[in-house]
Image: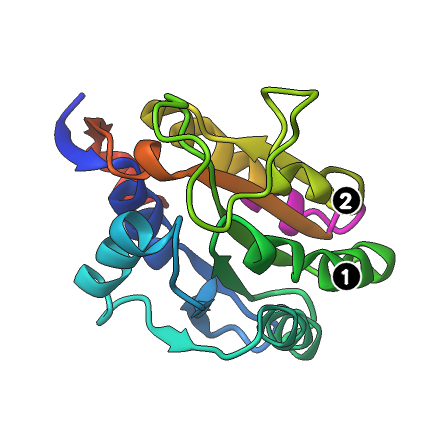
Amino acid sequence: MTTQQLTMTQALVRHLAALRVEMNDGSIQPYCAGVFSIFGHGNVAGLGEALWASRGALPTYRAHNEQGMALAAIAYGKAQLRQRIMAVSSSIGPGATNMVTAAAMAHVNRLPVLLLPGDTFASRAPDPVLQQIESFQHGDVSASDAFRPVTRYFDRITRAEQILTALPRAVSVMTDPAACGPVCLALPQDVQTHVFDCPEDFCSPT
């Protein structure tokens, strides 16, 4: 198996950019049309860098309100008859929680959207950080846990190689006629930049 060294978010972005879907009219289109994002503490250094490097294959659209961009992404999925999606990315604190209402709306209406909130450091070394929403009673809880009841699939990526199984599972939920709905992959700040040996097949899925 041929591999290449990539950061977790580079692998995530390249996989998303390579996905294709056959539409009802027979045309082949990119499955993910792009990413709405408000960059801040928790998603700019890792995911932001990866998106910039792949901007030609997966466009990024700057937003001004997290709930608004999530609703726009959900509307896109509805307009595309659930055949294509858009992703949304936010910072770790209020930016993430601003998307929860939109996620609930997508959940009720079985509409696909890929939520990529930044999350607190998996190492917990810098703690707390700017805008972090913390729980003093639960050390493993962050703002992203608010997505658990309003998504069809939730995962927190605490090791870079976990993206190899988590992202395909998320896509399988969004493309399942019965289980279709919002999915959330919470991305801790440090893990976003962790490098691992990524199989080249993951970056060019069939």
Mark 1 secondary-structure assignment: helix
What residue do we see at 81% from left, 63% from top?
A: 105
Residue 112 on the magenta span: no
Does 176 appear in magenta?
yes
Q: Point out the stretch of residues depicted in magenta.
A: 171-180
Q: Does residue 91 lie above or below 157 as drawn?
A: below
Q: Mark 2 or mark 1: name the one nearer the start of the chain.
A: 1
Q: Which amino acid, by three-letter code, is at mark 2?
A: Ala
Which residue is located at x 66 percent, y 54 percent? Answer: 97
Asked if residue 204 shows in the view, the reply is: no
Where residue 34 sits in the image (x, y, percent)? Answer: 42, 69
Q: Name the residue under label 1.
A: 101
Nearer to me, 67 or 78: 67
Q: Position of residue 147 (x, y in %)?
A: 70, 44
Q: In this view, does 184 lie to the left or right of 182?
A: left
Q: Nearer the viewer, residue 191 or 168?
A: 191
